[in-house]
Image (spheres, grey):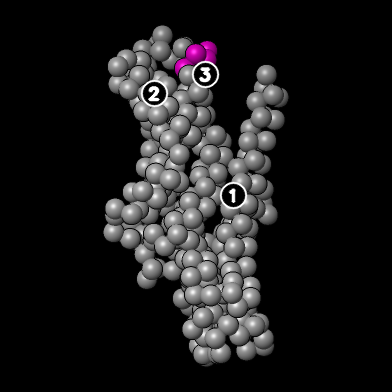
Amino acid sequence: MKVHIVIIFSFIFLAIFAETIADFIPHKKGEVFSPPSSSHLLGTNDVGDDVLKELIIAMRVSVFVSIFSAILSSTLGLFIGIFSGYFRGLISRFFESVTEIFLVIPTLPLTIVFSFHLTPSIFNIVLLISIFSWPPMARVVRAKVLQLKNSVFVQSAILFGASSLWIITRHIVPNLLEIFLARFSMLIAYSLILESSLSFLGLSNPDAKSWGAMLHFALKRGALINDAFWCFIPPGLCIAFFASIFVLLSLEIEKRYLERFQSEN
């Protein structure tokens, strides 16, 4: 797990200082679709710009869009999951129904449809991903809250007259930490793939280039026809690697949670 965390923070560090790091690469125009060389380590794109420099700058959008989208969607899913799992009544059943409906909706086609009718911007992409990505978090949290609500320590707190807010903040939320982190890590990977898919289809802001946008422009401007594999393989590998790290981190957290749960029971 430590290796995963170090790699993740390395990506975040590179994303924060992407412009500064990219400035160390000489801004020297090369020939169009020039292959990797000592002057341009990853070659040049369709306008002669250095692909490595473009890759580093695009990292900022891809990393931060996926992280902020995951933060918003996981927070929303956490609140809905706690509310629908702990409280009973009409509003709780309403949230349960909404969650089930969103779970069966195909996310990517729906985000594509909405993206066509919205102004291409980073904010709209984050908003769309957040709106359609929260149900899995809500469902997992709700199941755990139902289990915790029937536990001895929560029932004892209820008998002693503890308020719902006190029980949720002192007993429910702390026991959701591992599940939340596991789902949050998975959501970052999912958000990155969704953002890359939308950018690849040309539905994101073209002025804020991401790894998905690099794939879009590589396909649109003839990188495949010219066998310029260095224009689309690096961003594709970055998307796959960054998403895989978060998936592996999520699986590692779940594994440790299951081991601890089995040892306690």
Q: Residue most toward the top?
A: 159
Residue 99: quarter of image: top left
Residue 179: quarter of image: top right
Out of 18 and 224, give the one closest to the viewer: 224
Residue 32 is a magenta residue: no
Assign the magenta stretch its main secondary structure: helix
Q: What percent of the width, then of the height, locates residue 83?
A: 37, 25
Residue at image mark 2: 96
Residue at image mark 3: 147
Residue at image mark 1: 246
123, above or below 156, in the image: below
- Do the numbered discs 3 and 2 sit on residues whose CB atoms are within 8 Å? no
Number of other residues with Cα within 10 Å of mark 1, as a class: few under 14, some 14 to 19, many 20 or more: many
Q: What percent of the width, then of the height, locates residue 198?
A: 44, 56
Q: What percent of the width, then of the height, locates residue 240?
A: 61, 57
Number of other residues with Cα within 10 Å of mark 2, as a class: few under 14, some 14 to 19, many 20 or more: many
Residue visible at 60% across and 78% down?
226
> Which mark is in front, 3 or 2?
2
Comes first in the chain, label 3 or label 2: 2
Q: Which residues are magenta?
A: 147-152
Comes first in the chain, label 1 or label 2: 2
Comes first in the chain, label 1 or label 3: 3
Residue visible at 41% across and 9% down?
159
Out of 232 and 144, give the one closest to the viewer: 232
